[in-house]
Image: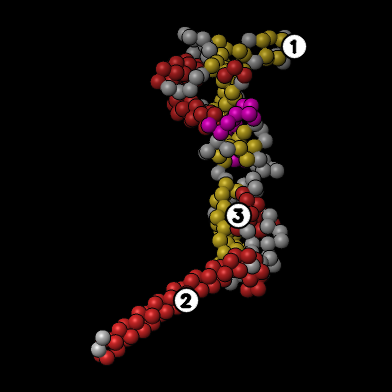
Amino acid sequence: MSHEAAVRSVSQGVSADQLYRAESMRLLKRIMFVVMVLTVLLVLQNQKAVLIQLVDHPIAQLKVKGEFKSLKAEQVRGSLSGVIGSGFLMTDLLRIKARVEQLPWVHSAMVKRVWPGEIQLTVQEQVPVSYWNQNSFINAQGHVFSPKAIDLNFELPQLVGVNELHSEQRIEMLKLLGHINSEIKQYGVSVQELELKSRGVWEAQLNNKIQVALGVIHGVDNRQEKKLNAKLERVGKIFTNGQRIELDQIEKIDARYPNGVAIKWKKVSLVAGDNASR
């Protein structure tokens, strides 16, 4: 082997060794970088609460937004005692939401942080569409809510039924109430109270205080709707026919019969001393 060939061979051997060592160092640095990143992430995960506490600051304000008629913003803030002064970052927003939504007049609530120290609540108030069993309200979703004091000044109908009814069944009651009212408004009356008794028997009280027995109603599908409408038409004729009927003396109309109605009259005491009943 000539001298020049020997030099080239040594040079190639040195270059390959250097390349191998350089590649190994790059690989080692990558491994060390990954290990370091994982270590930092692990520390941050385990010490997250401690680190947050170091940079956290107290909540200074609770802001309540929404359009209210029966609910007051003070009631919402009053349900969140202990939140003011607690950690802005550590406070559990889901827990705040749950506490607010326990208020009877609250339908739903959204909660968010507003830097630097405010908790903002957007509250949707319950909208009652009917009274329920003398001591509660029902919303359009059929959910019952029971404020401590029931305001009787709302112009709402009254639904009466067993408390074990599901929200879907109460929605069906609302649909039936709406259907009956749409059919009888032409006679100048409306339903003031609709009651579902045992065995699916329905009874209504009109705004003129007359009770109406409707019997069993299986929903308001096409077939049942025709039967119900026929009953309501027979009841309506009592209020619109030309005969002299003393409506204020009617106590109850029984519309369960297929071709007519029966009328129960109030007992009338005459001033002259003779007792008569119709």
Instruction: Identify the mark at residue 29; answer none if there is no mark.
Output: 2
Q: Is 166 included in the stretch rendered in magenta?
A: yes
- Three-letter amino acid code of the residue under disc 1: Gly
* Label 1: which secondary element: loop
Tell me the residue at 64%/45% (across/down): 104
Percent x, y for residue 91? 64, 62
Tell me the residue at 59%/17% (across/down): 199
Residue wearing tag 3: 94
Q: Which residue appears farthest toward the front when viewing the image?
A: 1
- Three-letter amino acid code of the residue under disc 3: Leu
Distance (Cα) linking label 2 and label 1: 114 Å
Residue wearing tag 1: 273
Q: Which is more N-terminal, label 2 or label 3?
A: 2
* Label 3: which secondary element: helix
Number of other residues with Cα within 10 Å of mark 3, as a class: few under 14, some 14 to 19, many 20 or more: few
Residue 165 found in image quarter: top right
Q: Nearer the viewer, mark 3 or mark 2?
A: 2
* Display colour scheme: secondary structure
Range covered by the magenta-colored residues = 152-168
